[in-house]
Every structure is written in C-alpha cells, then in structure tokens.
Amino acid sequence: MFGLSRGDAVLWLFVLLLVLAAPILLNPFPESSALAQFNAGYPDLMQRFLIFGIFAVGFNILFGLTGYLSFGHAAFLGAGSYAGVWMLKLLTINVLPAIIISTLVAGLFSLLIGYISLRRSGIYFSILTLAFAQMSFALAASVLTPITGGETGLQTALNDPRIFDAANTTGNIPAPSLFGMTMGDSHQVAVGDWLWTFNVGYYLCAFVMMIAFYIAIRIFRSPFGMMLKAIKSNNERLSYTGINPRPYTLAAFVISGMYAGLAGGLMVAMDPLAGAERMQWTASGEVVLMTILGGVGTLIGPVFGAGLIKYFENIFSKINESLLQTWFSFLPDGVSDFVVTVIYPFVGKGWHLTLGLVFMLVVIFLPGGLVGGINGLYKRIFNKSNQAN
Amino acid sequence: MELSAILLQVLNGLDKGSAYALIALGLTLIFGTLGVVNFAHGALFMIGAFCSVTLQRLLSISTVTLDETKTDFLGNPAKITTPYVETWFGPEVGSAIIDWSVPLAILFAIPIMLFIGFAMERGLIKHFYKRPHADQILVTFGLAIVLQEVIKYFFGANQIPAPAPDAFIGSFDFGELIGMGAGTLMYPYWRIVYFLFALIIIAAVFCFLQFTTFGMVVRAGMADRETVGLLGINIDKRFTIMFGIAAAVAGLAGVMYTPINPPNYTIGMDFLVISFVVVVVGGMGSLGGAVLAGFILGILESFASMRQVIELIPGINQVVIYLAAIVILLARPRGLLGRKGVMES
C-alpha cells in the first residue's frame, strides 16, 4: 500500500487507528471516579504527545540510522517556533503557512549547523551541536530580543500586520485557525460518565504526524536509509567502497532538523507563543531520552517514548502526598504511612527521579529501548514455539 | 583601555577557569584511564558542594535552652541556641570551627567522594567499558538526573549559602601591591584562595601521576592497557582508584566553590556542559590540555563580559566559550593538545 510493505502498512494503519481513537482510548476512567486524573485525553496533552512524537521520529532518523548523537536538536525546534509565530504575525492567522515556513527555516538552519558540525564525528560532533544550540539559546534570550522576544517570549498581538487577513484592530487577538477552523475548538461527547473531547488542533496534529510517520517509514526502507545504516555500522568500510558518506549524513541531519522545525511549527499553531527555553540543552536532552526510552532505530519507539515521557510529566507529577494517603488508607495506619513515605519521593515533584531511574534501567538492560525489549520477548516466545514444533 | 582593567579581567577569569580546569581534569582522568565519557561528573561537583553545606548544618546543630530572664516580643521566654560544638570545645573554639566549616569540609568530603567514586565505578561504570560511547553518555546522563533529584529531595531547590571564613571576607588590593594606585584592582580574598587551591590540587594530581610508581603504572595503562595487564599488574584496580581520585577532585572543586556561588541542585549540570566543551577543546585524554583550556576559556569568558567588548559585539559574553570551542575544533580537530587516535571512531 502506497509503497509500503505489508508489515509496515499494518503498522501505519495501527498507529493511525490509535491516533484517531486516542481521545477515547486515553480517557478510560469515568469522570466521577478517583482515577479520572489519570485520564490523558485532554487536547493540550494529546497535542503534545503527537508533536513530541514528530520531534522524536525526526531525531531518530539522525541518531537511530546514522548513529550521530546530536545534543542540540532543540535549537531547530526553537527556530521553527520563532519562524512560525512570525508567520502568524506577518502573513495570516491561518496556520498552514506558519507550519510550512517553520519547517523550511529549521531546514536551512540545520543545513548551516550540520554542514559545520558534521566535519567531526563521535563526541566531537555531540559537543559541536551542543555548542551551537547553547549559542542559539543564549542569543535568543539576550541580543536577539527584537526578533525573539527575549525572556518573555514571542507572541501574537492585536496590532500585528497580518497582510493576508482582513484588517482587525479591535476585539480579541485572533486565535490560530486553519481556513476558518479554530485550533482551540473542541467537540465534546458525553457517553454515560465518560467525557470525550475531539479537538480540531489535535486532529490537525494527527494528520501531520501520520504524514511525517509515513515519510519516516519510507526513509527507513529506502536505499538512502540503507546507506545511513551503513554509516552507523561501519563508516570506514563505506568510504573504502568509494562512497563519500558526508552528503548522506548531512541529508539525514537536515531531514531530522526539518522534523524538529515541523514540531515547532505545530507547537505554535496550537499555542502561538515561543520562548527561548525551548532551545536550551535540557530540551535537547529530553528528545534523546524519548528516543532511547522508546527504542532507538525502531520506527514506533520514539513516538512511544515521547508519549510516555509527556504522560509522566503531566499526570505522574500531579500525584501529591494526600492523594497517596487516600490510596493506601486501606492498609493499617503504620504500614500505610510507611508505604506513602517510601513512594512519595518518586512521584509528584520527584517524577524526574523515576524518569532518571527508568532511563538508566532501560540503557543498562534494554539497549533497544522498550520497543526493542518487547520485540526481543516476542521473538523469544515465537522461536520457542517453533522449536517445539 | 587601562592596564588595570585588563589585569582585573585576567584575575576574574582565573577563579572560574580554576573550577573549569578542576572538573575538566577529573573528566579527562576518567576518560584517559577507563575510556568512559562520564556525564555524571557535574553531579559529583554538586555533591561536593553539598558536602560543605551538610557539614555546615551538622556543625550548627544546637541545643535550645529557655532563658527566663529575657522575653521576646510575645512575652515568651527567649530561646537561646547553643551549637553542640560550642558546648564541647568552648565558645571560642566552637564558633571558630563553625566559621571555618567550608575549609573543614575538605576533610569531610574526601572520604565521601572517594567512596562515591568507587561505588559508581564498581557498581555501574564497570559494566559499560565495552559498550559504545553513546551508551556511556546516556547511562551517566541518567545517573546525573538521579543524583540531582536525590539532592533536591533532601535540600530543596533553592540556593543554599555556605559563607567563607570571616578572615577571607573582603577584597585584596592588588592595585596597591603593584603600584597602580589603591582601589584600582580589588579582588576578593576567597577567589585568591580558590585559585591557589586549584593550583595545589592540579599540581598534586600531576605529581602523583608523574613521580610515584602507582602513577607510572597508571600512565602506562593509559597508553596501553593490554600490555600492562599482560605484565601481571592488576590495572583494573588502579583505574578504579583513579576514578575515585577524579571524583574527589570534582568534589573538592565543588566544596571550595560554595562561597563563590551558593549551590543548588542544578549547579552540576551548569558546569558540566561547559566542562565538556573545555575537555574537548583541550583534547580528549590530554590532562595538560584540559587544564590549559579551562584557564583559557575562563579568562576568555571574563574578557567577553567587559562593558567595552559587549558594546562592540553585543551578546558576546553569552556565547564566547561556545564560539571559541567551534573555532578551535574546526581548526584543530583533536583540540589544543589532543593525541592522535583518541575518540576518532
């Protein structure tokens, strides 16, 4: 189907189904139940799942295929965000040009940085990308304030030119929309005690994400993708066969930079605000965490990892001490106090601790990430049943 | 521009450069011996800084007695706190001990940092010798997050001040010393102390490696681990000890840095990023290069923060280190003093 093998087509359709049904699937608990706070089916969070999924899928094209570990990818996300907000300010409140331009701007930016950084490999490459990203962050937060809005960030205003839109200097700041469909609009359906929110912005993200995912699958299976894998497994041998690997790695770098820019563009399409902290190296570290956690070099892993981390960040971090008390209140007093004291440092504000521990365990025991681990388990069971036959 | 202004920037660069150099020295030591890229090194610096905070708190544990003769503004009897050290050693010696808690923390931190270093190497890093550098970076990055969060859990997220002894508060007038007029070149005492301390530590590490049999074996192991192992020397054990020493160097750098910059749990990460740039600029695996690059980048950073320079090139103070790193890496692929064949695969 569309040039995909049967397995890949099934994977793509499976992801499509999950993404379309996410508003229902992510709200498994009735509104009035105590578990309702574990529901992740609200638009803001679901959009973030997809946007960071795109970011991580793109990062995986560079790191998963070529093995070049970039510690500065957040710079492209940030550049894309700024470009997106400027398009919303200057051209039109329609998000389409903003998303396209932010992808292109991030592509150009990554071409420049990639051209220089890819002259080195290994840790030198990581440090060069880190240095460029930190420079972009520092400049965006200080000197480039007229362009980036400095520390307060860049946002749309009422008196923006918006040359393609009808003049509008009264009333509210227009909200980003796609041909009249406002991103923030939602359609809520209540079935019994369940409340499902179908959000316009979310489905735009879903549409873009499915295209991005399709392109990623095609890249993985293409001769170009094979070349990138060859760079990862043995760069030296590849150059002995008379092939110059540089253009291929640079292409991979620019593609992953464009994915990051696309994610940035979508981010501002959902919420027209861009701040410098989006470019900081911790943000670059986050996408590395997502990719590794889900499974580097696998197709679906990064999406999975992005979802997991964003879920932890938004849901897990809300658990507080009194909530824990009510959960364990069925235990005898002393025991429940003890259990709460033991668990408390790992949830709520301490969720980073859990993240760090899980991440370490994954790197130590599952070098292929969670998806790699599941695949391994599946293969082991499958092979055993084969032997039995 | 006056000469005194230039000298002042050099001096300002020295203390930051000392911290960079000490952290980068430890990083390079670990990389040169074990071949491991340790992203948790900044966390070791932070733990060192919190050693001095902890000691200060331990020393200030007090007994509370009620003084019936005085009352506070609510009419209750006034509380008088007396630290235990003052009751044990008498008020004079006791308060002196509390005053000198930061230098004393050096003694407190060395065994702790050595222990943490050994535990880290034996418990985690040992299993990562044969894994790719990317895996080492990632697992130590995870460890850094964990250590950071543990410290945050116990000490909170705010900066905690740990002042220098009273004797070192104030500034030394270099201007008067070299005859440029009083008050032109003021430099805080503690920063002089920090610089000298860093020089001593750096010299000690180099002497240890250069002039002892142990150091000779370690250097031989750095050059060719396999051959040294074939000679019947247990090189792994020595490398573990070197990891402990590197951790202690980072920890001591942190202990002494607390009066300059009150630590919070992110201080390690802040320094780590720059320290990695320093190590790479100096050349991976080159101890001299790490120290040299540390001081050069520290001084460069303080020059870039001068008002005249910022007026000329806005924003340069924020980016000068990274800019220098990019230029040096592109002009000299192996860094300033890097050897051939290190980290080039």
Image (cartoon, coloured by chain):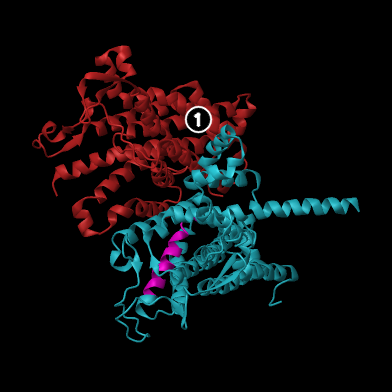
| Colour in which the image shows chain A | cyan
Q: Looking at the picture, how far across and down is residue B110, in whole percent? A: 43, 25
Classed neighbour count for the residue bearing mark 1: other residues with Cα under 10 Å, few (<14), some (14–19), many (≥20): some
| Colour in which the image shows chain B | red
Secondary structure of the residue carrying numbered label 1:
helix
Regarding residue A245, the answer to whether it shows in the image is no
Residue located beneath label 1 in the image: B116
Q: Looking at the picture, how far across and down is residue B217, in whole percent? A: 53, 26
Q: Which chain carries label 1?
A: B
Q: Which amino acid does label 1 sit on?
A: Ile
Q: Looking at the picture, how far across and down is residue B107, in whole percent? A: 39, 22
Magenta stretch encompasses residue A77: yes
The span shown in magenta is A67-87
Please give the name of the residue rendered at 62% of the width and 28% of the height, measured from the top-left corner.
B229
Please give the name of the residue rendered at 55% of the width and 40% of the height, measured from the top-left corner.
A343
Regarding residue A321, the answer to whether it shows in the image is yes
- Numbered circles on residues, count: 1
State whether residue A180 is above or below residue B110. below
Dominant SS in magenta:
helix
Q: Can you name the residue that lies furthest to the left here?
A: B181
